[in-house]
């Protein structure tokens, strides 16, 4: 028997008007929309993370103007019978994908078999290299089964490692309080920064399931924004959490209250353009089970997971190194993996420009294709060494240093006008 | 025909007394010890990085007391005919390994087919988790061909991804000056820190090939220490730079002056215990070639390399997540991949303790086994998400959450007395 | 834009009554049902190979009584504009899968997300080990996205390598004639054998697209049965011809006339139970292109293909050897890979029986799971050596020789009553 | 501690004159040369299989004239303490390789770091395609650590999967008798065939350890030739039995009496040129253990083994199909995997000829490189379908059908004069 659908979405309606009420903040009091038993298999449908604000077209105006108070639209919470705080919730990711063409009618595209990658503007979200890419750009990807191509990034074709960017259980009140405390403290160190250091709770555009009235208002003032990954998992954006993986999530509230969203057809490690994955609406099939008392038994703080045997295995990588010296000032940082990663990314972009890609195309390739970013050295004071693994098989044009640099490709990414 | 040996070591003699004079600092004026042609294949012998200070025994006193002014002992520089600044030096890593038993007599072990992993004391080098592991520890590994086991870490057996921890070309005078400037500035921000933020040039115990007298003295005052990776590569400690890889190094001085050392039988991403790899003396076979003007042609800043098809491919990973919240203070950091990695490491150690390993054994496993550390998310403000991939196939005892926690192993790592 | 559907099936109707007329024999004169251009992407729907004779239930009576004159039901032929004899037709397999639940209504199952593996009776089809398994059996598989399980084979869960068992271009009249000649000669050597040596053309139940009247009758008398793979590809049952593969088919007739069917969710090398794959109805997305004159240019006789980076990569195999000595008579055969393979299969079955599987379950596992069968030695007279690679990760119970033999599983395969 | 060497070879002396007496026939009465305990690690040295008859030069006269009564020279037997008939002998292959240059002096080459592949003449051994390649040819390979190249096959470079072509325990008297019976019966069906169907016992050039006088004579008359793999393993030529594998061998005589030889630096599935691997002298490190009564416990007939995680993983294969129709007569064979494999090999050779290789070079590539040969279909009467997987990454020149055919390479294989 096929999985029952415990959360259904209507791709023509915004989140507050969905037949099944989802949410877009984290709060322990959001009532479950459905209940499943340990051992059960079920399907969850998801809207893409911005609630359908981005269109399958050739302008990046929508990325530039996206309203970031509406995300991430989350499907759930789903109660798991018998789950109690301190348990580990086993979640097997059986499969996921875009909605097959014809099964849903989206309002923003002629087909459901598409996705997009956005470079977010510095004034509205930013990204890992936002100082170099302050403006908004967009690439549309056509999803051909398990592979994808983009009219905005010619000469590239690859198999995605599809995954939910965001999945986790509801926090307890205590944990939520702790999140709000520490993030508020960080924001207070530079409250007017652009882009901001973190995002505080925000009632505007909050969707909290069936909560209404004063209950809604209280919860909306407390509820955590969905951008960061936290102890419960959440928006981890781990590209390898794909079909065939088995995850173990800490349970904080009775019933666990599992939610998810932000499906990605593919993503590079780091998701560097902010919305760097190939974002899509779609479905995900799950199987759940419980390990009673598993949190203490296995000493768990954050979720853990078992990787899948079913990933594309590219084996020919071109690898770029980065070290923790600021590239603009020449300043030496101390074992700063973030800076070392930035430099590895910049090195890769510089290289790709020699082979006919624009900087924006290169940036998008690194965000969307299955690149790996590894922290190779973190003890050789004062330099961290981070390495970026770019699979050469994804390119349909020469890309190796044995080969001559090549002419520009014909396409370009979509810009804001 | 087999490769000619262009650099030979005597494992019974300290670096200053070697028949072929090596070096342990970076400086453009160190004269080459040999010359090879583009297209040539040759062998280089290497002492282990501390110059043989560590012994194949069951006490960590040697790790505690190691003299860190003597490392890294480097074999070279090797001149490549025709290499000029701005070229890319192609280096194929054909193979490497420990010296076969019987071919060399080491002074610190009954055999050459061994290696060690050290946890360095906080007062003498430290490591990634030095606040948790302030004392010195050591594990000895027996190298059985391509696999290894340790009497100090029972129940673990794995195939190493052997690689040179350190390889690169000599810097130009300008580049060296830049290194010294930026690192001195960093040190000046906290000059008495323990462990130090970085290491300035140091004449004591400097070995600079055949340089003598005033030339030696001047160079020794300027020559860069070997610990950090830098623009030329150097001590990158990239575990995947293994047999079958092809590297492209920027050339800064006529003849390129390639040097290498710090051979590792295996290492986890990050080399987290500082001397976290399985350190060994051994040999490496190389093939070199030149891409004239390659630095500008391909927009190269740091070395790049092509990965090898010949790596052990573990496919069953247990994955630990970490986020950038300080685990002691609860302080929220902003997209700090270093902190997120530390938490992923601590999570993995905590988990392994449930399966019978001591904290020190777990720390050493993460440093020495082929674990992967990936920066999964670096844009989801304010949390970076780093994931640590632990191959479950390396354990000879149960290690999955489906399995009950297990009793302690029989062994323990060597301690300082 | 999603692929246009060039061939649609109705799962409630037998092949002769489909809205789009398919076929179940090979003949050059069957008119195309659709036409595509080089460079085009399109979708083809397929019924399972027996035309829906097998039911999702717990009796193998349907396998025992299956009418083998109705298969394989093929979707096509599809004409490719500009294709001429001597060209190579490039076919990229973009993706394939069962119909998502709810998109089609099958007559023989409550869901479309299922498949089956049959052991065919010796008197009706047989299989590779039919002398040991003369009766009919069946296992039903539940398809959970990319993984599958079976109520008839407990303790096994794996990711399938989905593929079209059958795909190829129509033969020319000359090639068809040659097929008929050589197969008739083989049949004539033992015309009454059970199971038969080969199957001659048969008018009964032939479906030949829109051919009618005398044209139909002539073609039906000549048209080749679909069971064997031949020069054009056809029923190759190559498990690695999966999503991400690129195939190159010889073209024999104007327009190429590409047809396909017999979709498999998974299959072991050899498909040893005859209907050893996990058979399913479903869809397949293709991209086609042409290499003009490619047959002569590249010296092609049979199709060639490029493998996919997207396969499950099991790495822990338990391997069984077989040699070419008949196991019943002790007779020595001369480099007979078929006999050596049979013995490797029997060895694996014997082994699996020690771990609680019935012989029928073991046989079905070898037919349906992604096992590899390699011809390791074919020159060491007089013994061929064939090896069977069984991925141990597919088992949820112990399966290694380090582990004690285990009790029977709870389930059993479906039998005929 | 490094492994003790239990069998040492002198590469300047023929087998009968070795300091440690090996053997070149299988017989239960050959006395062990050494004894090891379960749990022990040890090293065994091996001469190449023909006893050094082949030279590192550019003439194939030695291959043409090789004396096939002298092979395979085997190192052993090694007794394992406590092993009894019915036990399973666990053998871990820890590592193997050619002798490092300088550690041994061979009589037939300026270095030990070499190997060769021979096409044997039809009148002296033959090979899988001997009707197409009736004459003797040879290619010499230079072994650069784990990769190899050949002056006789330019444009190819690959990583070998090193393995012992031959390893196994001594047969019991009963098993030996059975081998002799069945092989004699086969020979009797065509006693004068060239090449022969099988090889009967032969006293000439037999070496049986320390056996002397009448004991030697009796044993030499009975002892089995070493060419075929049999129930005990023996000359299986399984390319994946490499470092990191764990094998389980049936024990037939007290002490098990393990012997091995025929080391291969690399081999394609099938070893199709007869001496198709890259043959070398070298060393192998092993670890042994026992499963008491394991043969009955696990239902073992032939050896089984666990594969290694440490293999080169090429992922871009070009795949050739073959079916069981005789290519010369057009005769249809019934599910004959041997013929189908021959046709897949011929298809691959024909293709490689379009890219500048001679037929002999192509044949040698298929024999020596890590190609895979899989039996994809063995039930689709009357055609078996065999697929040959050629890794495209081993070629340094274009090799795909998207690329134009290329000019001949500069080199050619060594011929007999």
Image: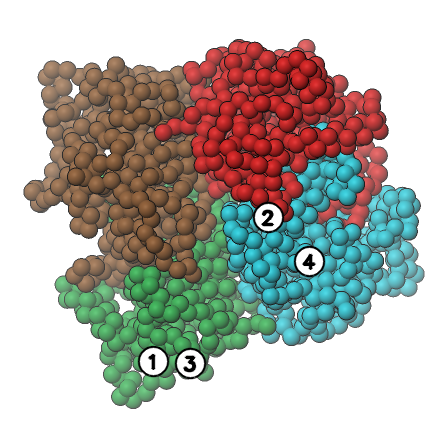
Chain colours: A brown, B green, C red, D cyan
Disc 1 versus disc 3: distance between alpha carbons?
9 Å
Measured as percent of width and height from the top left, residue D171 is found at 79, 48
**Residue D320 left/right relative to B46:** right
Which mark is nearer the camera, 2 or 4? Answer: 2
Name the element at disc 3: loop
Q: Are marks 3 and 2 in contact (CB under 8 Å)?
A: no
Q: Chain of mark 4?
A: D
On the same chain: label 4 and label 1?
no
User: Label 3: which residue?
Assistant: B33
Label 3 and label 2: CA atoms lie apart by 53 Å
Foreground: B183 or D407?
D407
Evaluate whether label 1 is on the same chain as label 3. yes
Q: Residue at x 53, y 27 (%)?
A: C78
Q: Chain of mark 1?
A: B
Q: Is residue D358 left or right of residue B188?
A: right
Q: Is residue C112 visible?
A: yes
Q: Are marks 2 and 4 in contact (CB under 8 Å)?
A: no
Please report the residue visible at 54 percent of the width from the left and 43 percent of the height from the top. C292
Q: CA distance from mark 4 to mark 1?
A: 50 Å
Question: Residue A253: where, in percent of width, then height?
Answer: 26, 24
Residue linked to disc 4: D360
Q: For the residue carrying disc 2, how many other residues have a C-alpha within 10 Å: few (<14), some (14-19), or many (20+)?
A: some
- Determine the secondary structure under disc 2: helix
CA gap, disc 2 to disc 4?
A: 20 Å
Report if the CB atoms under discs 1 and 2 are less than 8 Å apart.
no
- The residue labelled by disc 2 is C297
User: Which quadrant does the C terminus of chain C fall into?
Assistant: top right
For image coordinates 50% across by 64% down, the residue present is B94
Residue C153: image quadrant is: top right
Residue receiving disc 1: B30
């Amino acid at each position: 028997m096929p999985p029952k659908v415990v959360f259904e979405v209507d791709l023509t309606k915004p989140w507050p008007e969905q037949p099944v009420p989802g949410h877009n903040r984290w709060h322990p009091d959001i009532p479950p929309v459905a209940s499943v038993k340990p051992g059960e298999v079920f399907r969850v449908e998801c809207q893409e993370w911005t609630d359908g604000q981005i269109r399958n077209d050739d302008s990046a105006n929508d990325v530039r103007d996206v309203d970031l108070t509406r995300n991430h639209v989350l499907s759930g919470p789903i109660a798991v019978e018998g789950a109690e705080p301190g348990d580990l919730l086993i979640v097997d990711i059986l499969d996921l994908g875009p909605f097959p063409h014809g099964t849903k009618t989206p309002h923003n595209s002629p087909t459901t078999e598409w996705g997009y990658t956005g470079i977010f503007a510095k004034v509205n979200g930013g990204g890992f290299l936002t100082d170099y890419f302050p403006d908004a750009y967009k690439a549309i990807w056509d999803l051909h089964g398990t592979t994808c191509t983009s009219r905005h990034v010619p000469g590239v074709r690859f198999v995605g490692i599809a995954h939910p960017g965001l999945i986790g259980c509801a926090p307890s009140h205590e944990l939520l309080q702790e999140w709000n405390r520490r993030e508020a403290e960080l924001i207070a160190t530079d409250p007017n920064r652009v882009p901001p250091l973190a995002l505080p709770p925000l009632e505007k555009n909050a969707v909290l399931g069936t909560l209404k009235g004063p209950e809604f208002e209280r919860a909306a003032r407390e509820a955590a924004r969905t951008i960061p990954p936290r102890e419960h998992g959440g928006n981890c954006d781990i590209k390898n959490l794909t079909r065939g993986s088995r995850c173990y999530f800490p349970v904080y509230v009775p019933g666990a209250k599992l939610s998810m969203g932000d499906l990605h057809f593919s993503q590079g490690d780091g998701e560097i353009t902010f919305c760097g994955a190939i974002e899509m609406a779609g479905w995900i099939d799950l199987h759940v089970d419980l390990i009673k008392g598993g949190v203490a038994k296995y000493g768990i703080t954050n979720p853990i997971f078992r990787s899948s045997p079913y990933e594309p295995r590219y084996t020919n990588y071109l690898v770029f190194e980065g070290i923790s010296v600021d590239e603009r000032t020449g300043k030496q940082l101390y074992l700063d993996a973030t800076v070392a990663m930035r430099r590895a990314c910049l090195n890769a972009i510089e290289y790709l420009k020699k082979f006919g890609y624009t900087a924006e195309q290169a940036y998008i390739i690194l965000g969307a294709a299955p690149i790996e970013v590894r922290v190779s050295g973190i003890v050789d004071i004062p330099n961290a060494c981070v390495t970026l693994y770019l699979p050469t098989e994804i390119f349909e044009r020469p890309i190796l240093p044995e080969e001559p640099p090549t002419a520009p490709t014909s396409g370009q990414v979509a810009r804001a006008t």
